[in-house]
Structure formats: C-alpha cells, structure tokens
Image (cartoon, rainbow, N blue to C red):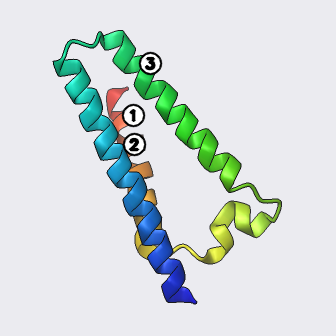
Amino acid sequence: MRKVFLRTLFRYYSFYTGGFVMFLLALAVAEYMGMPEQWIGWTFMTATVALYAGIGILSRTSDVDEFYVAGRRVPAVYNGMATGADWMSAASFIGLA
C-alpha cells in the first residue's frame, strides 16, 4: 500500500513540476514572439491562482489530521523540500529588508 502511495505521489509531483516547466517555456516563447510584459504577468498570476484554487478544491477535508499533516503520509524527502522552499523564501524576503 505504501509503495503505491509513494508512486502516486511521485507521479503527481512529476506532473506538476513538468507542467510548470512547460508553462514557463511557453511564456518564454510568448515573450520572444512579442507578447507584452503586462500580459505575461497577468497570465502567470491567473494561472498560479487557478492552480492553487484547483488543488484546494480537489483536496478538501474536514479531518484535522488530514488538514494539518496530510494524515502523516508525506515522506521525509517531500516534506524536506517543502521546508527548504519555505526557508529560502523567508531568507530571500528578509534579505530584501
């Protein structure tokens, strides 16, 4: 059961990462072809908000354990990547101050 969960989690992570890279490449091509900066900014913002809203709607739960710690099913590697991303984001923000 755990192997199936890890395989599924890896598949989702790969799908979102690949989709994000493809989206960035599409925006780079659009910029190269002359798309205005303001349109690129609005496209990126709209796509990001829509993606997060979709994830939130698809993963609704009323269980406290599921909400805060994902039922304790997230492996250490993925949890570490999330913690590292938070740390780098905070360090960058504080560095700008």
What type is the residue that disc 1 sits on?
Phe
Distance (Cα) linking label 2 and label 1: 6 Å
From the top left corner, tell me how far across and down residue 73 is, in percent.
59, 77
Q: Which residue is mark 3?
A: 42
Give left or right: position of 83 versus 53: left
**Which residue sits at x=25%, y=22%?**
30
Of the 4 image quadrants, the one containing the N terminus is bottom right
- The residue sitting at the right extreme is 62
Distance (Cα) linking label 3 and label 2: 22 Å
**Residues at circles 3 and 2 in contact by the CB criterion of under 8 Å:** no
What type is the residue that disc 2 sits on?
Ser
The numbered mark at residue 74 is none
Along the polypeptide, which appears first: circle 1 or circle 3? 3
Vertical arrangement, residue 29 with respect to residue 54, above or below: above
Q: Secondary structure at mark 2?
A: helix
What type is the residue that disc 3 sits on?
Trp
Give left or right: position of 76 versus 35: right
The numbered mark at residue 89 is 2
From the top left corner, tell me how far across and down residue 51 is, in percent.
54, 41
Q: Which residue is mark 1?
A: 93
From the top left corner, tell me how far across and down residue 96 is, in percent.
33, 27
**Which residue sits at x=68%, y=56%?**
59
1 vs 3, front mark: 3
Give left or right: position of 55 versus 39: right
Vertical arrangement, residue 25 with respect to residue 19, above or below: above
